[in-house]
Amino acid sequence: MKLGSVGLFWGYILFGVLLGLFPLWKLLTQPSISFRLKASQIFSLAVLTLITLLYLANLTFLPFNHGDDYTSYLTFPIRVLVEGFQGGDPFNQRGIEQGFGGGGSINALFLSLIPLAHLHIAETGAGLLLLIGLAIAHVGSQNLRPWSVLGAIALVLVLGIFIQSTNIASILSGCALAYGILLLFTQSTESSSAPSYQRSIFLGILLAALLLLKGNLFVPMVVFGGSFYIARLLQIQKWWVIKEFFISALALVICLSPWLVSNVLYHGTAFYPLLGKGLSYSGGFGFVTLPKTLNAIGEFTPLYCLLLVCGLAFISYSRSQVQIRFVLLMIGLVILSTALMSLTPAGMYRYSYVILATPSAFLMLSALAMSNRQFEAPIRWLKPLTCKRIFIFIVIVTSVLMLNQTKRVGRNFFKEGLYSRYINTPINLAPNDFLSPDFAKEKDRYIALQNSIPSGEILLVQVPSPFMLDYSRNLIYVMDCPGNAGPRPGPPFNQNAEALAQYLRDNHIRYLAHAYSQWNQQKFDPYFIDSCLNAAGEWGRTLATRQLLVNEQMLELAKNYRVIFDDQQNRVIDLSAPLANKDQ
């Protein structure tokens, strides 16, 4: 089942451009709209534009994560373009755990236009620009004034800068979709006297799109969608609200259906882990240790403070009891759900950013969108402008606290970016780093490795840079977490090497590529021994233990079967050719 291709993505791009030209043409043909900028506002806009361009340009030179980007997240968009779906690999555990993998499809869309090395700017830029557009639309619909628009852009830039800068296609795009859901509720309160099934369908599509980005966005999908309908039911208290809910749920399921079917075909489960683990056998995916939980709560605290400050400010000046009720409900659900998520591996700062940061941004922009005559100050003698300035000051102070907590702004703008990795290039870059002078030579080594087997044969790889391989020449399976995923009954990680060879042959896999040189160094690395094999959490120990066992099996297989390629780093083993002098 193909859900992506170069031609399909080009069609999406053309369709999006045409959709964007229509409102632009309407705007340009309405001379009554006036948006004159003063010199100070032009200067502010220029500074914001420069900061945005520097931020996005810097992302182009940031390094990818060797642990999971090189083995998984860089291969996903390649697989989408070549095979039509990123999840056609039963051995890639990260592909299974992602759920649906819409983030990989977003990257595949950009990969049809730009080089693979520049996916950072695609990951961040797509969500960032969409958020900026939504923010301008939000304030522009009620308060289209230069300073309001500039403030909206600035707030979105802060939102983008505070997140991590790798594997974030699903995070910033998720913020944009969640923001759209919150905007939809605001619109629903303005015309609540009659049901709107069209809006219900649109909400279902937004919720489905949010979940499709990544499986762990299930929580924000439930929180924002649940807040939407609970608040509407409290407001209207009519049966047709229940009908609206079921229409949204039906639209959600219909949108998810192609992906659910693909997941069943490729992963053995429609949705990991809520509907089964499928071809993943990692185990130990339960609660994390107390220190990790406390660390997660510590990182959440500044965002909790920001959310509470924004919520209190909104409640104090808003005149809509419906929206106040919605905000209170949403804040309660957000804090409760993220506190529970902190107990699990999905409770990390980056995974919780969508559900924590989006409501804060929405509430801050709601203040910017509100005109002075609608503004009701917390203390009657305060003027609206003074009240807004106090509100902005509190938000700035809270943001500074968040800056001290997360320490991500410096990395996104300076560390390991344009200056430190390109202008002042370090001399010890790994050969598979896109900025390394040896990158082309490393790519040639992988091409030589792949050319050692016939075209069309299945190749299973346990190598550090599978994104360098040609996925149109061979069907390639990637063991990103060795021993933790594979066709049923699962890899025999706890048996002898011959059991692994037989398991692979039973699944029509003849050729195995193994980075034996890297493994012979890694298994003696103090970090691997102390922090992985002896990790405090069961889940981490499970991954590392199976990685050790399977890699040792592969070393043994190289002694028992013919090695058809060896460049002193990686080798390819032919599992159909046992050595004559070996007792099988």
Image (spheres, rainbow, N blue to C red):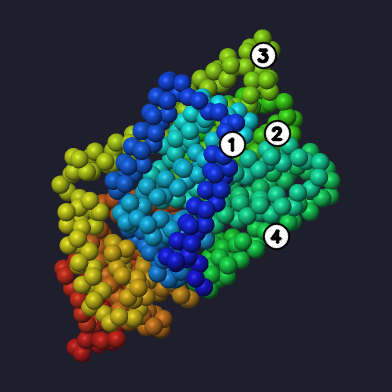
Q: Position of residue 3 (x, y in %)?
A: 50, 67
Q: Position of residue 538 (x, y in %)?
A: 45, 55
Q: CA distance from mark 2 to mark 3?
A: 20 Å
Dot 3: element: loop
Instruction: Place residue 264 in its image quadrant.
Output: bottom right
Task: Give the residue drawn at x 54%, y 18%.
Answer: 389
Q: CA distance from mark 1 to mark 4?
A: 39 Å
Check disc 2 and report the residue beneath it.
Answer: 323
Whether residue 559 is visible: no
Q: Position of residue 66 (x, y in %)?
A: 31, 54
Residue 250 numbered mark, or none:
4
Amino acid type for the residue under numbered disc 2: Gln
Residue 379 numbered mark, or none:
3
Of callouts 2 and 1, the N-terminal one? 1
Contact between marks 2 and 3 (CB within 8 A): the answer is no
Q: CA distance from mark 1 to mark 3?
A: 40 Å
* Label 4, residues with CA under 10 Å away: few <14, some 14-19, many ≥20: some
Instruction: Place residue 378 in its image quadrant.
Output: top right
Dot 4: element: helix
Q: Position of residue 525 (x, y in %)?
A: 24, 54
- Image position of 145 (left or right of 227): left
Of callouts 2 and 3, the N-terminal one? 2
Question: Residue placed farthest to the top in the image?
Answer: 381
* Label 1, residues with CA under 10 Å away: few <14, some 14-19, many ≥20: few
Of callouts 2 and 4, the N-terminal one? 4
